Image (tube, rainbow, N blue to C red):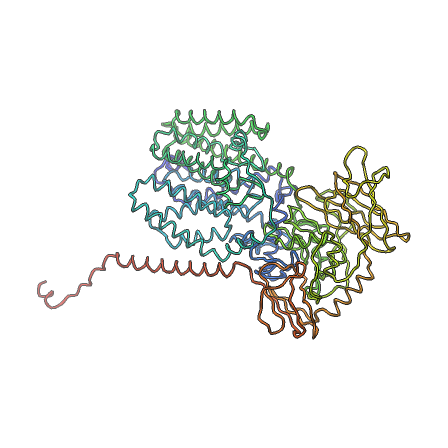
Amino acid sequence: MDRSTLRKAVYGGHSPTRRAAALLAALLTTAVFCAGDILARSYPFGPRTRSVNDLGNQYVPFHAHLWDLLHGRADGGLFLNWQSGYGTSFLPDLGTYLSSPFALLVALFPRDEIDLAVYTITVLKTACAGAAMAWLLLTLRSGRWWAAGFLATSYALCGWSVAVASYNPMWLDGLLALPLFCLVGEWARERRHPLLGVLVVAVGWIANFYTAYMATLAAGLVLLLRLWLADLDRRRTAAALGRAARTVVLGIGLAAPLVTVVYVGTKHAYPGREAAFTAVPARDLLARLLPTTYSFNSPAVYVGTAALLLALALPFHRRVPRRVRTGWTVLTCAVALSFQWAPTSLVWHAFATPQGSAYRQTFVLCALLVTAAWLSLSHGVPDLRALGAAAGLLALIVAVASRSALLHPVAWLVLALALVGALGGLVLLGRDPGRHRGRLASLALLLLFGGQFGETAATYAVADRLRLGHMDDYAPWGTRQQEQADAIARADDWPAHRTEPGREQTVGNDPLLVGGQGAQYYSSLTPDILSRTLTALGDGYTSRGRSVQSLDNDVTDALFSVGARVHSPPDPHQNWFPQDGTRPTVTREDVPPLVTVHPAPTQHFGNSPYRNQELLLGTRVYTVPRLTLRDADGQPLPPTSWVGQGTAVLGASITATCPAGDEVYLWAPRYSGTAATGSGPTGRFRADRGTKISAMQRLGTVPASGHLRVDLTPAAPSPVPAGAVGCLDTDRLHTAVARLKATGATEVHVSDATVEARIPAHSKGVAVIAAPRIAGWRCAAGADDAVPAGQYHGLIAVPLDGSATTVTCTFHPPGLRLGTAVGASALLGLLLTATLGALRRRRVAPPEPAATTTGPLDRVGA
């Protein structure tokens, strides 16, 4: 660009459009985002995985399931997911993880590039958030287009986006929604785009209602401030607020069919951890304003050094009207303080204690800081007095933050370089350069953009690296997943039987990622009845009960019609245990159909999973012997003792007597370590006191002597329950399976959300569908009317009186009817608004000029 063009772009004149600022922000955001991953050598630019925590466990598998749905390869549909948790409601998960319009882009990628698809979606969401913020900044006040793009990039790549939302991509929809909702507020204030405003709110709430709720609160605060600054009379202020409220209500109403389903789904979900809010120390809060700091549970409010300096300079910038300085400074400080008080923190999080990070609303404060920086810069570069005051405040922040453990040595170097770039660029930009105007402008832009690019890329890279040391991580799609998927595809015969992906899980949602129909399921909406039923049968879980695991047990495989099971070696990426280099294998069993007939239940589940399995099976198949627990020296320990604690107890053993040839199972949900009998595989148990319990595992067979010994090698102090060992009589199990097959359904048809079965004539008792009785099932026997399904020890049950030969059960997501009614009302309101608007415009439109004609008198007059 020549000197004249550069002068106009940097110092004003004929500024380019908002599109240029939005495009600049999107391009800068994309470049810095990818540069951070390149520096961290993270996927897809290096060997380190990005799939930490819920990104690998939830978001990638759910996007894989969406790919299958879009390509017609999934078991189930929008209402029901037959692949996870032996049959779970899918629409709440869709509304929680997959309802963003960006999610549909997965269909354009190959199935084995699902990690790349999710990465691309993440980058696009972040870039669009930057573009939307650039548009908003120039709407709030005109200014230099490049400056709007520069500061919008600071927002898109704020600390919250980099450290938290980059591996929770569903939250990035809130990062995009916030500037869009603020634009909707501006439209309401100016009587513009009423229909578009409603649609923007609706799409934002559909994309991710959780962060959209936070963005709505924030946009409301910004609108109130803007109305106060406009100094309108009460009537005009009330009218603007009314238009905004109407827009939000109609928009949320249009999103209600999905939002209500998710809301009701949370009511049926397994309860999460109840945690008291604890504010972070001031030193840690201030440290998160600085580059290259990282922490899981503190607000990541980094927005870049230049943006922070400009925001700190706002109260001292004399070119900015005092009312504007006061209003934005007070609002920003008030929101910051609200993060540190439990009642207001609950308000930000929709009155529910967050499971995990307690500062998910941080992007709101980042947006306010960037907006304050824009208002400071758009009124002209702050003078040396204002910049000096801002530098002094920054020095005070650094002094307090220096006592925080979050500041690593690299932070000081990055901060120093960023400060030189930010202060140098702003000082040069604010000078009256005379003849050297173009050169100084070029140098100022180089310092500002170079400093921002470097410090943000470094911050992103540090977050990438430190997350791997603080959280579980998972490998992207590779040879292991492909071999699992191939083995499942060869064995799959749904709904004749289920094919279990296996106990040796790769991620918490293996059935969604590699296929099959298993017990595994991990979601914020894991049904309470699913988790409790499987736990009562001896299953394990992680994430405090919201991530249920596969249960490798012959009895439960028969109960849930698991006719094929994949056995894989432990995931080499985890390195929890030694690897043996084997490939996945498949075992097959003769199992009952999906629908079986049982006598009416007369007992309830108890404390022993072995007895609970027998209740569902209808036959005694286990011997649960009396145990003797001994320490490493062979000395008896009291029943239910903890093993692995104290210097004298390095190991332990269990001895018992069982029928020879029986299969040995060990159930020790709180035990962590290994267990072995010498006649079978070594069982590996992982548990802790808060988040995980171990599943029942098979350890081999009882020797001919009948004397059984289980050697325990604890990895941590662990309790062993009195009824830990169960010895399974496989002959009795086969007899029970044959009986269930003979009396069970002769035909079973499964569609997306319906199960139809033909049962033998004169069947009495209850027909049991091997699926959890989650809310939403309605069933009918024969020609009877459908009624809410009954429950048989946690499974779907239909009473039989001997007259019916068919059973039909249909699933309808709870909350959908209410949401549909609300959505229809909102649509009617939207149409009414559009009609009234069109009529009003016709009334106020100027009359068209009358057409002139030339008559005889006119011609005479001429």
Q: Which residue is drawn at 43% across and 47% down?
A: 180
Give the number of callouts.
0
Q: Which residue is situated farthest in the right direction here?
A: 705
Residue 527, position in %: x, y? 61, 54
Q: Work out whether 610 lies above or below 734.
A: above
Find residue 749 and report its horizontal and vertical position in percent: 65, 68
Which is more toward the observer, 599 or 819? 599
Quadrant of the snapshot with the N terminus: top left
Percent of width and height locating residue 243: 36, 50
For the C terminus, the image quarter is: bottom left
Q: As drawn, is 735 to the left or to the right of 62?
A: right
- Asked where in the image residue 652 lies, by quadrant, the reply is top right
The answer to whether one can see residue 483 in this image is no
Q: Which residue is drawn at 70% across and 73% down?
A: 760
323 vs 369, left or right, is: left
Is residue 607 visible from the viewing direction of this image? yes
Where residue 778 sits, quadrant-wise, is bottom right
- Considering only vertical position in the picture, is 17 above or below 373? below
Q: Which residue lies furthest to the front in this view?
A: 602
Q: Which of 772 and 357 is in front in this view?
A: 772
Tell me which residue sits at (56%, 26%) in the image: 403
| Quarter assignment of residue 440 | top left
Q: Nearer the viewer, residue 19 or 215?
A: 215
In percent of width and height, residue 604 lies at: 69, 57
